[in-house]
């Protein structure tokens, strides 16, 4: 990023973070989008203002967007900055945004609340995020999982047909159009068109100076898909408006709130040395459409973070040995797994940097949708987890990356109790829950004939959740060196894809409403 862009809000460097107040409208109520961003911001002592609890609706429900717009407009004059999710503001959340319930015209009209805020609170910086829609539908039940796979394939084949990469692709697309329910496909394509128009409107607001910085996050996708055509148009808009230092487009979604809160609090960014643990810096992660190295560079550029050899902060990136696999799949000692000797060598590299007094952060991309707990068990023999400044491994590679970059920026206060608690929670959640506990609980839920996307017996599932964490107590003891922090794990939504895992030392959850 140019020095001009990174210095644009230099006055914020004079104002201490502890003096800052930021209004935050999160993407939805999941821990990764609601709690984590606020936890990191609070490490620096900043005041984060959130909508009244209950106003942001959970799971499949859509929030009252008119009430949210009023809250935002009333809150803005008392804020130094606003961090806003367009999906929440315009459609009431990420899942509702894929349902084509609100027309593009109504959404573009609703966006004008930001222009009114700019006039009423001209000194407040506005950071906006909007998603570039995924290449398939939401997975909300077993049936939708079938159509999720079919629509993903449809998106890929449409791309191949339009680019002339496969002579049979057009015929295959027509066959899928007959197979996929008409309403499913209509909703998907309508939502795509609406999303694209709203993204162009967000860019226009940036060009007019209403929005200070805009992140357009490419949601789950693959190198071949319909999103490629939309990206081309958006990138032309960005280039034509001379906005390449204020509008960014890269893979991600759920991490945007954490990144933009830290962008508001630390406009000058920081220097980081990136160390690749593995031989594939150019690998393309699952659910993404470009080499991971490109996403790393663009996320850092958006946050004014500079790659610098010898920097005090070190970001260690563990890439998969071969292809990236799902953390939920059974592990094996196949050639694509790191051997125990390789893991020990990786951990020694991190331990040596820590011994030099450097701040070490570990981005574990060995698997998608969860970390490698056995890597952490090995690392604990070289470096107590409490001395690791940050860890991330959840969901997609860019989701984990963005959260960890935000933690790096939040680390200007040192590796204090709150930061250590945040790292411990990421270990418990990203690695242990996602890779082990979730699969065990899912098996018990399915054995009872329940749907893991719409769990009926929440109290029983909560008990299973606690029991399965207790079943891996020996692993936890090994990872935490016999000092496992007191923690609580609960379901935030009636599904198992994520859990809310919080330690006592971290202060507990930010969002406290029951679903």
Image (cartoon, rainbow, N blue to C red):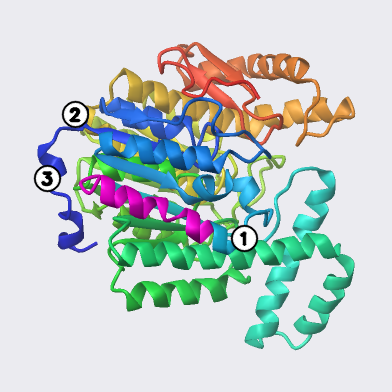
* Mark-to-mark CA distance, 1 and 3: 39 Å
Distance between the alpha carbons at the discs numbered 1 and 2: 40 Å
Quote the CA–CA distance across marks 3 and 2: 13 Å
Would residue 468 be found to the left or right of residue 430 on screen? right
Residue 244 part of the magenta segment: no
Give SS at disc 2: helix
Q: State which tag comes first along the sequence, 3 or 2.
A: 3
Identify the image quadrant of residue 13: top left
Q: Which of the marked residues, 1 or 3, is nearer the chain's N terminus?
A: 3
**Residue that carries the numbered disc 2 in the rendered image:** 19
Residue in view at x 46 percent, y 42 percent: 69
Magenta region: 107-124
Tell me the tag on residue 466.
none
Number of callouts: 3
Badge 1 crowding class, 10 Å Cα cut-off, few under 14, some 14 to 19, many 20 or more, is some
On the image, numbered disc 1 is attached to which residue? 103
Q: Which residue is mark 3?
A: 11
The x and y percentages for residue 200 are 46, 68
């Amino acid at each position: 990023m140019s020095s001009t862009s990174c210095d644009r809000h230099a006055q914020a460097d004079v104002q201490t973070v502890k003096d800052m107040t930021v209004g935050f409208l999160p993407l939805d109520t999941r821990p990764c989008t609601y709690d984590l961003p606020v936890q990191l911001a609070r490490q620096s002592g900043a005041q984060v203002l959130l909508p009244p609890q209950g106003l942001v609706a959970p799971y499949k429900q859509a929030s009252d967007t008119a009430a949210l717009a009023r809250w935002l407009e009333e809150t803005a004059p008392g804020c130094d900055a606003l961090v806003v999710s367009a999906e929440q503001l315009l459609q009431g959340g990420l899942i509702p945004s894929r349902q084509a319930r609100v027309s593009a015209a109504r959404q573009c009209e609703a966006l004008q609340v930001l222009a009114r805020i700019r006039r009423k609170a001209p000194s407040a910086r506005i950071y906006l995020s909007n998603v570039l829609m995924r290449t398939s539908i939401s997975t909300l039940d077993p049936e939708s999982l079938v159509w999720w796979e079919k629509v993903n394939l449809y998106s890929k084949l449409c791309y191949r047909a339009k680019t002339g990469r496969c002579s049979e692709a057009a015929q295959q697309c027509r066959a899928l159009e007959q197979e996929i329910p008409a309403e499913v496909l209509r909703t998907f394509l309508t939502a795509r068109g609406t999303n694209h128009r709203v993204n162009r409107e967000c860019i226009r607001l940036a060009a007019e100076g209403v929005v200070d910085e805009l992140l357009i996050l490419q949601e789950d996708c693959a190198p071949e898909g319909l999103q490629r055509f939309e990206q081309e148009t958006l990138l032309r808009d960005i280039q034509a408006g001379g906005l390449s230092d204020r509008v960014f487009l890269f893979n991600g979604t759920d991490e945007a709130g954490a990144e933009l809160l830290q962008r508001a609090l630390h406009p000058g960014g920081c220097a980081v040395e990136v160390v690749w643990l593995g031989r594939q810096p150019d690998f393309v992660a699952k659910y993404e459409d470009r080499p991971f190295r490109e996403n790393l560079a663009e996320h850092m550029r958006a946050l004014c973070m500079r790659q610098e050899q010898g920097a005090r902060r070190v970001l260690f990136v563990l890439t998969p040995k071969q292809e990236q696999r799902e953390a939920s799949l059974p592990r094996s000692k196949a050639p694509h797994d790191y051997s125990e000797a390789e893991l020990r060598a990786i951990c020694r590299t991190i331990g040596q940097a820590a011994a030099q007094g450097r701040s070490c952060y570990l981005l574990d991309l060995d698997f998608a949708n969860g970390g490698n707990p056995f890597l952490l068990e090995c690392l604990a023999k070289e470096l107590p987890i409490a001395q690791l400044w940050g860890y991330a491994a959840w969901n997609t590679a860019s989701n984990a990356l963005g959260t960890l970059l935000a933690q790096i920026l939040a680390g200007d206060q040192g590796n204090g109790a709150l930061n250590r608690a945040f790292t411990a929670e990421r270990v418990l959640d990203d690695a242990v829950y996602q890779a082990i506990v979730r699969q065990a609980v899912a098996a018990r839920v399915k054995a009872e004939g329940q749907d893991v996307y719409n769990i009926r017996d929440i109290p029983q599932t909560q008990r299973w959740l606690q029991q399965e964490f207790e079943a891996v107590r020996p692993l936890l003891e090994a990872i935490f060196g016999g000092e496992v922090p007191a923690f609580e794990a609960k379901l935030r939504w009636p599904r198992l894809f994520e859990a809310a895992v919080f330690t006592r030392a971290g202060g507990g959850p930010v969002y406290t409403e029951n679903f």
